[in-house]
Amino acid sequence: MSVIDELRWRGLLKDSTPGTEEYLEKHKVTAYLGIDPTADSMHVGHLATLIVMKHLQNYGHRPIIVIGGATGMVGDPSGKDEERPLLDEHIIRENEKALKEQVSRFLDFDEAKPNGAIMVNNYDWTKDYTLLGFLRDIGKHITVNYMMAKESVKKRLEKGISFTEFTYQLLQGYDFLYLYEHYNCQLQIGGSDQWGNITTGIELIRRKLGHENQAFGLVIPLITRADGKKFGKSEKGMNIWLDPKRTSPYQFYQFWINTADVDAEKYIKVFTFLSEDEINKLIEEHKQAPHLRVLQRRLAEEMTRMVHGKDELQKAIEASSILFGKGTKETLAKLDEQTFLAVFDGVPQFEIDRQELEQGIDVVSLLGEKTKVFNSKGEVRRMIKEGGLNINQEKVQTQERIVDTNDLLNDKYILIRKGKKKYFIVIAK
RNA sequence: GGGUGGGUUCCCGAGCGGUCAAAGGGGCCAGACUGUAAAUCUGGUGGCGUUGCCUUCGGAGGUUCGAAUCCUCCCCCACCCA
């Protein structure tokens, strides 16, 4: 099987420029993927293209990760309705460092291997380029007509697009040209929104270096959700990050566990490296007994292990079974402090004065006033009335419920649950 | 610069002197059912000392016993004309 076939059955191939498949079958190439250093961590939205890079590497091709230090300073209009804020150099450098570390978890950066991955920053070859030089060497080869025809530009003509963002595709096109010349990089990978930028690069290589120079592009489809919501966000719309400091491994695991059935079938192909046979077996198994959710479990396992490692995966599974399995007041009380904190890592925490607790406080003022777990007392009352409030896994029956030091777990914590799966911790200080 | 239509609670949007904490929809929250799913159904969705009181309808003033609703000025948005 060729790498293209592999990507195709996995649903990772949306489109590629003519001749890509044939070329990849006959040659080992160098392929590049650009990542914007807009944050100091990637999120699950970055995963799909990164995984394509890994597949390429597995098939003997060499991946280059390009940190968009320069392009990030300009801003890509693709898929954006409005002008983007610019990033300054200091932030970009900081972010680059963090991203480097993350990517090396996925790709093999072993320099000794012919297809060892490398990482570069386009700021390094762009920063000293003079305006005149750029206009003469690069701008001369591409017509404005060509640039205006791009979807990303066309969409913005009504609303307005700055010259800076208009130029973006040339800048990214130049990256491809530079990499082609210096790293023999012939393939660019991207999301489908990158098609326009990628083809500009290919066009630039051909026009500047001549027709015998072949470069290719390959884009993956937008990863969607069956319910139409944007993939890669938590219920609250927060990004699911790869950095455990931003999204705890437990939350990360839960993100995948909560995948809808139809999506799970799709995602397990896209995001894991399991074989086609194995995946088909899992899908079959899932259809036999959907309530066991083997697909979601396996997906969450594979992803958490890939991103956070075996130990963190184990902890996430344990935490989940305590929270969603037979979690009772008794099992909670048995947890030692360290395990408790690990399980509830990332759960919002609130503090309460210990002395007040010794006297006993009614739930309503504790949660609605003293700690602000809830926005108002009215909200707490409402929640109790609806039967959606639990303290240490026991349902709160009445508004008069008094909370005192007897409710403390490990003599320190009170576990609040709202609804089925929203947790809060109150800490006695 | 001229004109017209607008700015209402998280969002859209009704209200156009009292019966307005403000219809309806969306979203969100909870409950039932379930598989930590989907769909469906039910309830909730400004605050508080909750038969009541307080704050809210772009901003500031004013008229009135009483204003989201009327008047004045100002700010902002959309469209049209120059």
Image: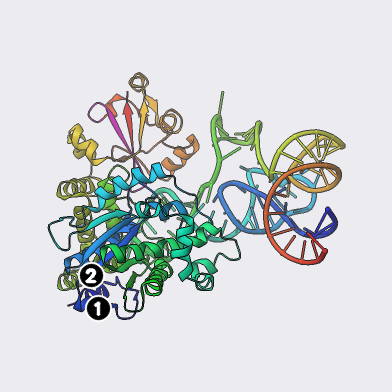
Measured in 3D between alpha carbons, the distance from the residue under mark 1 to the one under mark 2, in whole angstroms, is: 9 Å
Residue A297 picture location, percent across and down: 21, 59
Residue A149 in the figure: left or right of residue A302: right
Question: Local crowd at mark 2 within 10 Å, few (<14), some, or many (≥20)?
Answer: many
Q: How many marks?
A: 2
Give SS at disc 1. Answer: helix
A284 or A75, nearer to the observer: A75
Residue B9 in the figure: left or right of residue A223: right
B72 or A185, nearer to the observer: A185
Mark 1 is on which residue type?
Answer: Tyr
Tell me where residue A373 sits by quadrant. Answer: top left
Residue under pointer 1: A23
What is the chain letter for disc 1? A
Mark 1 or mark 2, earlier in chain: 1
Residue A102 picture location, percent across and down: 25, 50
Tell me where residue A29 sits by quadrant. Answer: bottom left
Residue under pointer 2: A29
